[in-house]
Image: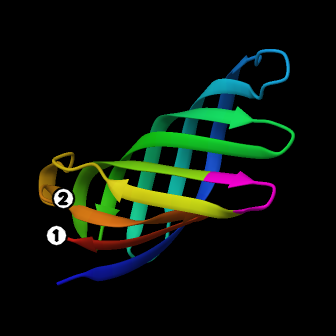
Amino acid sequence: MTKHLEASFTLDRWEGDPDPGVEGGPDAGHVLLAKTYTGPDLVGSATGHALTTRGERGASYVAQERIVGTLDGRTGSFVLEHGASMGEGFPTSMHAAVVHGSGTGELTGLAGTGLVEHGVLILDYEL
């Protein structure tokens, strides 16, 4: 049975190593991140990495984070991969997915897709 999750999070760490772009091109960087998830269905913490690109007319990121905590009353961890891309004159594209086979403990077998918005993880998942 598919369940729906909307979990709030706070971004506790966003430390980047900027990689200046080539002349005329966008800047890129690598980021270490940490989050705290709160909500009735997901309580836990996450650490991860993101790659970012930012230019005058657009920006994009891809990230992976390991979430450790309790989902729907079950304890364990899983890896979430997510990203977004936006640009002048183009619609914003966002995606998120549980990395297949990454669930541990009582979250073994977790699968799901959704998106990460500002401060909220939205996920349709199955356990």
The magenta segment: 85-90
Q: Is residue 68 left or right of residue 19?
A: left
Q: Earlier in the sequence, mark 2 or mark 1?
A: 2
Dot 1 corresponds to which residue?
127
Answer yes or no: do the residues labelled 2 and 1 have beta carbons within 8 Å?
yes
Q: Three-letter amino acid code at disc 2?
A: Leu
Q: Give the quadrant of residue 13.
A: top right
31 up-or-down from 20: above or below:
below
Q: Give the quadrant of residue 91.
A: bottom right
Q: Is residue 27 left or right of residue 42?
A: right
Q: Three-letter amino acid code at disc 1?
A: Leu
Query: Distance from label 2 to label 1 (Cα)?
Result: 7 Å
- In the rendered structure, does residue 88 fall within the stretch colored magenta? yes
Which residue occupies 36% across, 57% down? Answer: 97
**Residue 113 in picture, x, y percent from top left:** 35, 65
Of 71 and 86, nearer the camera is 86
- Give the main secondary structure, helix, strand or loop, of the magenta stretch: strand
Viewport quadrant of the N terminus: bottom left
Callout 2 secondary element: helix
64 up-or-down from 23: above or below:
below
- In the rendered structure, does residue 27 fall within the stretch colored magenta? no
Viewport quadrant of the C terminus: bottom left
Which residue occupies 84% across, 16% down? Answer: 23
Dot 2 corresponds to which residue?
107
**Residue 123 in picture, x, y percent from top left:** 40, 70
Of 64 and 39, nearer the camera is 64
Image coloring type: rainbow
41 up-or-down from 106: above or below:
below
**Residue 46 in picture, x, y percent from top left:** 45, 45
